[in-house]
Amino acid sequence: MHNGDYSLVTVHARIVDKMYFFGKQRERYLKEREFIHKIVKLEDLGDELIDAGCGTGIHLMLFSELGYKVKGFDLRQDMVNVAKKRNSSLEIVQGDMREFPLNHKSDIIICMYGAINYLDTEEGIEKTFNNFYNHLKEKGGVIIDTRHYKNLDENIKIWTNPEYTLAKRWIKSKDNIGIYRVFYSIPSEGIMEMEDHLQIYNIFKILFYLKINFEK
Ligand SMILES: C[S@@+](CC[C@H](N)C(=O)[O-])C[C@H]1O[C@@H](n2cnc3c(N)ncnc32)[C@H](O)[C@@H]1O
């Protein structure tokens, strides 16, 4: 289990890690594991799994507990650092899903908790699905958890406790592109950080590119 040494990571990875595997979020991860495991068994997909955009490595930990052979990658080195602390024996590397940094064909690729939405161009989505396709075995399967533009709540949400404050909101712009805006602060350390990025939320576009890359 992750030992709580955050010395190598940014405020972002640190707060995200604390929030993710806590309370309702913890239940969500466990339910996701159950759901994916059921599909894998039903479709007889196999037991080699790659987590694309693995974040702090919680799915990697949960699937290796079930005996899956797992590997993962994330764009952010700070996330990779936390994921590696949590799963010291696993192969977890920094890399971009548009380029796919693991030279390995797997039975299952998962891409969870809106990681796919971080791609901000259609070209990026297409490159990613082409890479997913090329990194799956013949009978493999991909599981993508995507956010839907319609379900985005533009209201600002704030979590605050003695240790940190985190505020986030989505801003909808046209053509189902949104801006994801997050603010973090750790008063005891005088830290404040702000992050903004574009995301594509159009599930139909995502499905379209999935279809053209998987119906080869
Ligand atoms: C909301 S987090 C979800 C993390 C993890 N999948 C989970 O369920 O806990 C989205 C993650 O996607 C990563 N990400 C964004 N764009 C990426 C890309 N092009 N390639 C790989 N990872 C990416 C981010 O760094 C972030 O860690």
Image (cartoon, rainbow, N blue to C red):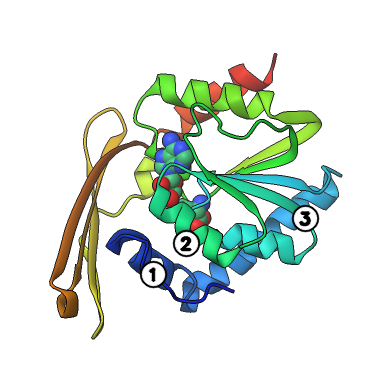
What type is the residue that disc 3 sits on?
Answer: Tyr
Q: Secondary structure at mark 1?
A: loop
Q: Secondary structure at mark 3?
A: loop
Q: Above or below — where is 136 with respect to 49?
A: above
Say which of 172 and 106 sits in front: 106
Few, some or many residues within 10 Å of mark 1 (<14, 14–19, 20+): some
Q: Look at the image and tell me in which quarter the N terminus lies.
A: bottom right
Q: Residue at x 23, y 30 (%)?
A: 174
In the rendered structure, which disc, 3 or 1, sits on the residue that comes first in sequence? Answer: 1
Q: Residue at x 28, y 27 (%)?
A: 175
What type is the residue that disc 2 sits on?
Answer: Val
Give the labeled residue for mark 1: 6
Decide if ligand 1 comes within 8 Å of the CB at mark 1: no
**Residue 33 in which image quadrant:** bottom right
Residue 150, how many percent across, how many down? 36, 44
Q: Residue at x 51, y 33 (%)?
A: 97
Nearest to the eye among marks 3 and 2: give it. Answer: 2
**The label number, if any, that marks residue 154 in the structure image:** none
Q: Above or below — where is 127 with respect to 178?
A: above
**The label number, if any, that marks residue 68 in the structure image:** 3
**CB contact under 8 Å: marks 1 and 2:** yes
> Does residue 207 show up?
yes
Q: Horizontal placement of 205 versus 84: left or right?
A: left
In the rendered structure, which disc, 3 or 2, sits on the residue that comes first in sequence? Answer: 3
In 3D space, how far apart are the residues under numbered discs 3 and 2 (Cα atoms)? Answer: 20 Å
Give the labeled residue for mark 2: 82
